[in-house]
Image: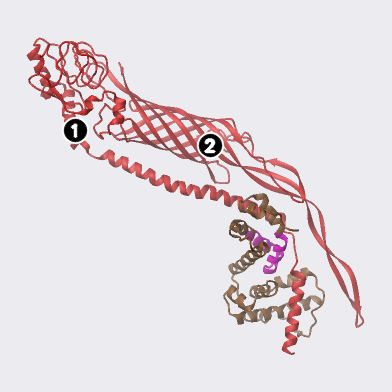
Amino acid sequence: MSEEKIKKEDELLDDLFRSSLGEMQTEPSAGVWRTISRRMLGTELSRLQFVNAGKTLRIIIPVTAIITGLAIYLGTIDWESTPLQAVHEEVTEGVNSGNDVNSVNSVNSVNNVNNVNSGSEKDVNPTTLTTAPLHHGTTPASTTAPLHHRTTPASTTAPLHHRTTPASTTAPLHHGTTPASTTAPLHHGPAITTPTTFIPSFTRHSTFEITSLDAVITDPILSGFLRPPVIGASTLPDPLASGTENASKPGHKTVAHSLDMGISITPDMVFYNNSSGSFKYNYTFDLGARMNLGRFFIHSGAGLTYSTDIGDYAISYINNDSIGYYYIVNAFSIEPGEPGDPQFETKLVTVYDSVQYLYDYSTRNRYYYLQFPLSFGYRILNKPSWRLSAEAGLLYSYLVSVNEPFPVFYVPEGRIIDIERKNPERNKHSLGLIAGISVEYQFARNLFLLIEPTFKYYLQAIDENSSRGDKQPYSIGLKAGIWYRLNFKNRIR
Amino acid sequence: MPLEPGIIEECMKQKRSAQYLLYQHFASPMLALCMRYCRNRQEAEDVLQEGFIKIFQKISTFRQSGSLEGWIRRIMINQAINHLKAKKLVFLDTDPYMLGNWIPDEGRTEEIDQLYKPDEMMEAIQALPPGYKVVFNLYVFEGYSHKNIAEELEISENTSKSQLSRARSYLRKVLAEKKK
């Protein structure tokens, strides 16, 4: 066979296949698009959730680690070697040690002054460097507490009365008291010092000097802003230290109270306990308040939670589709040599009919909840610059806003006959349990950063139709916020 | 039926309704294409599915100055070839009939200009060994030269030629058998 003929036969074969199959079309089964749609949705969701989750976690984890590490590092530094702290401790130790009070120079000086100038002042209480409210014979430091007789305030602004001598002056002394740079009203009582950074220096001549600028800052809150925190040497008694009990008066016990207020944001990974095994993100912005009672505290507040979910719909529609094909015989021929083998000329005819399809459609639903936590906690570690606490309690959620877009589905050559919503409606109310372990880092006197891994377990399902115990979601989140501390003291018997 | 304007832009925004329209427009011819590369319809639908997912994911890279059908076709062919490669695409040097099922060569004198049903011809192609099938499809249906095929499949041009020759021979035999 010649090469030319071979080539021609090859071309004939190629043409035969090309003409028969080149323009061929065949309808895929309905399941193909359903699978594509589902896969695309899964891809979008995974891109939305896991990729973003990765990015979020890539930021949150190192930041949390750095802050926590820094807090631990700063909290464990030995700050006692600082001169200020050393002086502070010298003064406070002497005062608190009761019998050793005479060894404190300043107090001795006061007594000496009293002895020199007034002589008969027998009821002066030298152990006045306390944090307790001031009464007889006590001297507040940088305080605005009411003064009674025999007290000498330092750094107050009220006018002076008798028995006072301005600091660093040579004015004659009266009645044996010597206030330091003070204009406070003075009544019958000795001059006294401040327990903290206000360090008076007494002389034999009944004068003393203010050696710290802190003394002029009389407002504890304002001074917290103006002055960086002295880590390890709290300038005010730590209200959170359990047992800030003062022995100034036997039988009285002072339990320090404080109120913390702050704003926080919490990204939560919510697991819905269903077969999908995936999680979704909730974001909560909350305003919180915490009442500290020694080492214990009560925490409450209000938060707004943004939550998303997938809305599933089953759309039934009818489309005009091919359901098969058949061949019609246009002509036939019988070869004379082969009478039993007729040759048919056929034509392909496609058959169309109304075919019902079911299509899974998904939307992105948005929900907003108001959440009100109420929990009780205990401060496990209480370092000067950081604290570690554990808390647990209840969480009430109320669904305030629902945004569930209706499916928009376009069937070019058919019509929709039914749209069935698969998701049940969400519950308006739900109650859950909340627990967390918080780390607080105090970066200013009254400001602290709070990082708190939280766990929430909802006692009810989120959906109305879900049976109890079936789909209670739980979540793991990380709360981060800035809080402000309002210190105040309360004396209880 | 021409594709509605704006569909590609909507698909780029990942709008499901637009994706569905695009799918509806191209699914049938692309399934036929996939069937030529696969052994059966089920396998072809799997390839079609993967191909469309890739199309929807990569549609932002489509340059609209070109032919959309050509671009989609190209993706489907690549998907089909990758599918065959995943199943160890081998370019046989021997005639599969030599390994058994030998059909006596009735010679090139056999007339093949008979009318065959399309599904019979499809079955014949699907029955080809994968290497023959890919080369035959690329050469006959896609208009590739042997050089292009060699580059595409990373084989030599001679291998491509021999695969095509064997594919034709195989198809002739199969069609002749069907005729009987």
Chain given the colour red: A
Callout 1 environment at 10 Å: few (<14), some (14 to 19), or many (20+)?
A: some
Q: Is residue B43 magenta?
A: yes
| Above or below, A183 relative to B139 | above
Give the side of residue A493 with respect to residue B153, left or right.
Answer: left
Give the side of residue A1 with respect to residue A460, left or right.
Answer: right
Give the side of residue A48 with respect to residue A347, left or right.
Answer: left
Q: CA distance from mark 2 to mark 1?
A: 49 Å
Q: Which mark is first along the chain, 1 or 2?
A: 1
Q: Is any atom of residue A470 visible in this view?
A: no
Chain given the colour brown: B
Callout 2 environment at 10 Å: few (<14), some (14 to 19), or many (20+)?
A: some
Check if mark 2 and mark 1 are on a common chain: yes
Q: Are marks 2 and 1 in contact (CB under 8 Å)?
A: no
What residue does disc 1 label?
A84
Local SS, label 1:
helix
| Above or below, A485 relative to A317 | above
Chain identifier of the residue bearing label 2 in the image: A
Q: Which quadrant would residue A436 be assigned to in this image?
A: top left
Give the side of residue A34 with respect to residue A123, left or right.
Answer: right
